[in-house]
Image: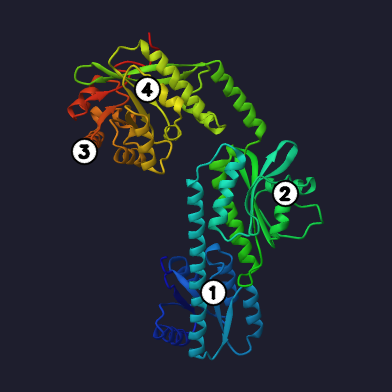
Amino acid sequence: MISPVRAAVLVVDDDADTLGLVAFALRRAGLEVFEARGGQAALDIVRTETIGIVVLDMGMPGMSGTEVVQALRSRTETATLPILLMTGTGDQDSVIQGLDAGADDFVPKPVRLDELVARVNAHLRRQVAWSRVVEDELQVRANVVAALGRLTISSVPEEAAEAVVSELAKRTESDFVSVLQLVAGGQLQELATFDRSAGVRRGGHALPPALARRVLSQAREGPWAEDVVPLPAGDHTPAFEAAAPELAVGAPIYAGDDLVGILTIGIGHDAGTSALVRRAKLLASAIDYANVLSTRAGSAFADRRDVADTRSRLQAVLTARRFHPVFQPIVELETGAIVGFEALTRFDDGIPPEVRFAEASAVGLGRDFEMATMRAALDDAVRLPSGAFLSINLSPGFVLHADRGFRQLIKGSTRPLMLELSEHEPIDDYGIVRKALEKLGDVGLAIDDAGAGYASLRHILELRPTFAKLDISLVRGIDGDDLRQALATGLQFFAFKSGCRLVAEGVESRAEADTLQRLGIQLGQGYLFGRPERAV
């Protein structure tokens, strides 16, 4: 943790002798000091310097001490800046006005310098301690947000919620956590809960109608915090009753613009922290976590009716085989000879493949679609020129869970096969992926999108593929771009040292092909050599 920078002291007094004496005493105590002879000068210094406390004379002409306090408290940046008043004899009323306006402390004149220094140091220590508390709190929240972002989110709502609740239970000091799903009829259903007595539990109860209406009304207005009032018997969920938190916060979870769920977090009494601070910290945390869940898991928490409808519609696409494979040639840049084909999928309704596969994955049909489209590609590939290899796109997750049917299917191929992995699905354990690939037998490996991101380069280092696909964003216009050429040259050397060959994707002009060949890249794919077409 980086230690907070010790801020300076600003002394404000229209009397030059008093100003100099106070400033001297503070500097002798090792503090950095700024001096101002009036209220406006003080405000100007605060805007440009890092000030930790203001020592302010109340009896200044022109802009009074009370007006300075009011001006500082009206600005967000200085709303909590400590202010120590120096007051003369008979200034009791001004002291009350200053404290009422927001000052934190006061010392009477003539000022005892040792007391003043002690009070200033006490306020600065408090500021440093608070800064560390804030920094620690922000770091904890950042770590939790990062952990939620790394979770593998299931398409099954209860499984997704259980993973989320388990992570929050492990990484926070909450006494109660729940993820509620909004279902038909405006009901709220527990998907997963945590409390310290029962631990993490998948599933749960529907909230009683009155409680569901109140919670849902709060969620539609935004995040909220409330002190928990014990509910009448039978009017609350068993999980919430067992946890018995004293403070609860909630934040809505969205899928796009639709409210699909609610994250609730509860904590018990903490005598060492003020109620206001506890409320603010917990509410800010819930907002952060719910925002991540909306992005990562919102679709998983959508109403089951929507999921069921989508699953039924996609199952019909599979059953009726409303898709077909197309094949794009991969050629030697020097001769134009075809050495392989990449199998791609086109859906009869025109939905882009990446959209359809993502949709299928979200409702638990991702592997079924991958298996069906791969089988169709292998069936149609028998009509392609013999001798050329076939590259098939598969996700790392599919490879990891390859079953006997998949292994038999690829072993029955009459031509060399290349399994092409993209960087769009993360790989957490490369050792497991390598073992899964070994079980598949004599198949090659290609890595997609080389140069488009860190993940694809790490895939090459860890998996040592036969081919790596140079991303189209680097190929497009490479003949007229020195930087693209330099990067492609580096990637070519990287691929050579890694033991694989680069295939340039998206080659559309002869100039691009000639430039790529000059840079040492031997294979290409793109409209220049052939568009994706059905096998004939």
Q: Is 35 displayed left or right of 450 in the figure?
A: right
| Foreground label between 2 and 4 | 4
Q: Nearer the viewer, mark 3 or mark 2?
A: 3
Q: From this viewpoint, which residue is outermost toward the top?
A: 536
Q: Earlier in the sequence, mark 3 or mark 2?
A: 2
Can residue 67 be seen from the camera position used here? yes
Mark 1 surroundings: few (<14), some (14-19) or many (≥20) residues within 10 A: many
Q: CA distance from mark 1 to mark 2?
A: 39 Å
Mark 3 to mark 2 CA distance (whole Å): 59 Å
For label 2, the SS is: helix
Tag 3 secondary structure: helix
* Residue of label 3: 497
Residue 54, visible in the rendered structure: no
Q: Which residue is mark 2?
A: 215
Q: Which residue is mark 4?
A: 411
Q: Residues under labels 1 and 3: Cα distance? A: 61 Å
